[in-house]
Amino acid sequence: MSRGGRTLAVVYDEGAASAGEIGVGLGDLGRVVFLVPDTPHNRLLRPVMENLGDVVALSGSSREDIDLVRKVAPDAVLTYSERMIRKTAELAEAMGLPSHSADVAHALTDKVRQRRILRTRGVDEVRSHPLRSPEEWPTALATVSLPAIIKPVQGGGSRDTYAVTTDAEAAEVLALLFSGENETGSTEFTVEELLEGRPSLPYGDYVSVESVCTEQGVVHLAVTGKFPLMKPFREPGRFWPAHVPEDEERAILDLTSRALQALDVTYGLTHTELKLTASGPRIIEINGRLTGHMNLTTRSTLGIDLVRLGGLLALGERPGTGPLDFGGQVHFQFNTMAPTQACRLERIHGATEVRRIPGVVGYRNYAKPGTAIPGGVMTYPLDVIWGTCDDHPSMIEVVRQALQALSYDFAFPGGPVRRITAEVLTNAA
Amino acid sequence: MQNTDADVPAAAATTDLPATLTAVLSEHLSGQDVGPDDDFYALGGDSLIALRVVASAQQHGIAMTLKDLLYYPTVRELTEYLSSSAAGPPPGAAQSAPGPADGDSLLAAGDLALVPTGVETALPASTLQVGIIYLCETSGDPELYHSVVGWETVAPFDEAVFRSALGRLCERHAALRTSFDLGTFSESVQLQWSGIELPLKIEQLPESDPVKARELVDAWKEHGLQLPLDWSRAPLFRCHVVAQPDSFHIAVATHHAVIDGWSYGRLIVDLLELYAAGLKDTEARLPELPAAGERDFIVAERELLASAEAADFWHQRADTTPLLFERGQFGGAANAVAKTGFPLSPEVLRGLRNTARTARTSLKSVALAAHVRALSEWTGRQKDLVTGVVVNTRPERAGSDLMVGLYLNTVPLRFVSLDESWADMARHAFDLEREAGPYRAFPLARIESRLERAPFDTVFNFMDFHVYQDLPATVGVETRSWWVRGKPSFPFRVDFEVEGTEAGSRVVVAYDPALLEERSAEQYALHFESALADAASQVVA
């Protein structure tokens, strides 16, 4: 199955593509070697990776890891995981292989730096200020003003991200973030102006753009529409194509191109999030990797494997790619979010019924019965429901039916087992 | 559902592939109805569930891999693919209907009655285990097949925590609770006891004294090797600790009949993981072991033993004129106490890797090709030469790398043509090993008895210590000063060690001075060294 005996080294951790998707997506491009830091996720998935390729443990030390990769002698070094972007750039650069440069990787993963570049290059003037201790809050506040958003300098998945509209709220959030017990373990944050979305219900007031960058320029694969955010910043779902007017779409794509150029991104897949405001789209953040989740949809319904596309780019190939063709249909994914209170998942009801709803293609539960739910406002999807509909209104209706059909039993500490429908979990925000 | 499945014989399963696949998928997807076009993922499947599906399918005699299921996620696609692919059954996959889950049932009913109380599981011993014990008995050499591994752990020593970690380790790995009985039963049996007394000796130094600590370790190293392990009494290992205030040396001596060299890494990681968790008073997160791993190995070995195809395969691979020794000149265990060898420079290793890469094969295959070329030059044999090669016999299933036991074999590989280019030789070596894959666990003793002599006079053992070295770092406890001692029974063994813990990369040639002169062994080493240099400098087309 492997072509030309090439080796693709994937720096792997939990991220936008699973080990299984990577094995399948890269399988016909060559031998896959998973380079893995020691994380609980990697320990769990190791048997899967071993069935799909070779597994090599990373030490965390630059010198040792570069030596290690030299021994693997790969033809490509790539990642699908936000956390591994810098490491991947370092390893690929040491091997002289295509990747983000170290500088670009830094700008893509450090939100303070990213904002500064976008600002100084005149792309987007979102006010922001770094925050390394609660004492810096007054200065940050003076620069940014309320309402503001506080988020880690590095990281993804909206973890440890909060909107604050009053000083009292800010005090509460700062106490939590600097308590040493936040969810990401971050110690450096950034305060940014809270971008106010334009009216957009029943859809979300933000979108993302999935792009392919090469030295020849940027090609946008798609604008991804979103379901409305759940508080504080949990993303419950996404769909293609986005539900935006043509001129707004042009502005979205134009801003994304300028932002990617400003950051000197000339390699790989990118995922750019933008807020839709009354005065036009604004950059939320740019990620130097494949978008999460959507490969499931492109592979099964469009026959396009984005993981494979990432592999080709890392091999230095120039795959002919243009905007994705959705065949006049709307493709969606929706995640039911776990309760914000700690509990244990006991049972799942209605999976079969959900799968029978016309328009639903599949339902997959991530959390199995017996799973301890940690609680908190981190994005914690219980499942994914995906499907294909004729238009946007019928998608909204299919999702509504699915959320009504699906329910979960949770055991809360000291209380009885409660059954909660996916609809209630989704509206809890 | 499960009972019905277990009753389906393999022949029936493969003639009704879609029905079997449907049943297996349904079983692992909470009993849901699975239609021919239902997508595995859409029904809630994920890659960990996929591993279980593949293991079940293999037990039903369906030759499929994880990749197959992930590529072809519906019963229809998978059936079409599997029916059209000429792939043979996966190595180690049971070919007939699996027996009852109870491990004891591999023994005859009369034998079952003889299993002593306190034994958790009784299984037939593998042929290789019996062979090793037999050689140990007949040689009278206490060091034979007796290995010791040691290292220093940079952490404070807490005796209670360490005892508990070692106890948990023994609970986890039945090999550490195993003894053998070669007489009581109608066949040789391995007994896995439910509990054992921990064979732990601790020496505490009141203050840090690295020199003294080292002396104590060295003394035990000699003693540990020479003190025989009685295979009839569990446990077949012992552990020694020399503790200083901030670090401690651990040495573990084991009988090769229960633990192979490749299991050491796993054992050590598990032990350190348990100890590190104990120090922090948290639960160690050890990955789940495959259920009935050793039992599956025995079942697969029995099937291979019953296979005329496997026996013929190996007979043909070994049946040529012996390379070094006359028939009868060597039998039983040799005493390979003499050593020679040479270091492998980074340049040569890099060159060999390049050759491997351009030839699209592995470093092992290039090194093996160079070994064969060296044998040819050394002995003057122009064609048709057999060498033994150490191979891994772990079942191909999820988590088999986590198993601790004896899952190694040494098999004859026969090179008919010896004047090919390096690239062809290396690819040839690779292909030979791959062709042998399905039969690789076939007991050496059987090949030998049909051939009426040793199937090979030389053994090539490729050892890449890299992963082994990295393993301890994964648990967050620093380790250093590693060493390993051991002694197998072959008269002429070539170890190709990559990044060894003690001496870096090198070649060690161990031989029996009663059978080979020092000058002769050194000549081989010179030939091997120049063959490697030549292979390393190749630019392969």
Image (cartoon, helix red, strand yellow):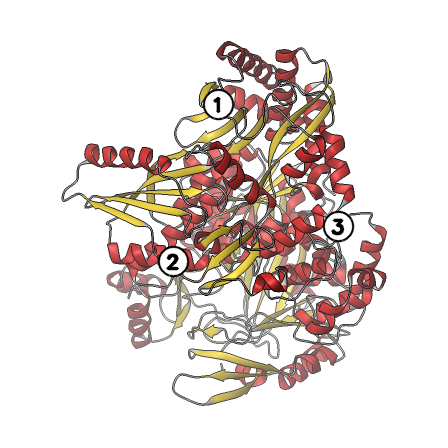
Q: CA distance from mark 3 to mark 2?
A: 39 Å
Residue nearest the viewer, comparing B188 with A327 = B188
Amino acid under disc 1: Val
Crowding at mark 3 (Cα within 10 Å: few <14, some 14-19, many 20+)? some
Q: Are marks 3 and 1 in contact (CB under 8 Å)?
A: no
Total number of numbered discs in the rendering: 3
Residue annotated with mark 3 = B89
Q: Residue at x 57, y 21 (%)?
A: B351
Percent coordinates x, y for residue B301 in the rendering: 66, 49
Secondary structure, mark 2, is loop
Which of disc 2 and disc 3 is earlier in sequence? 3
| Label at residue B508 | 1
Q: What quarter of the picture does the N terminus of chain A occupy?
A: top right
Q: Are marks 2 and 1 in contact (CB under 8 Å)?
A: no
Q: Residue at x 29, y 33 (%)?
A: B218
Residue nearest the viewer, comparing A56 with A250 = A56
Amino acid under disc 2: Ile
Of circles 3 and 2, which is in front? 2
Percent coordinates x, y for residue B485 in the rendering: 41, 33
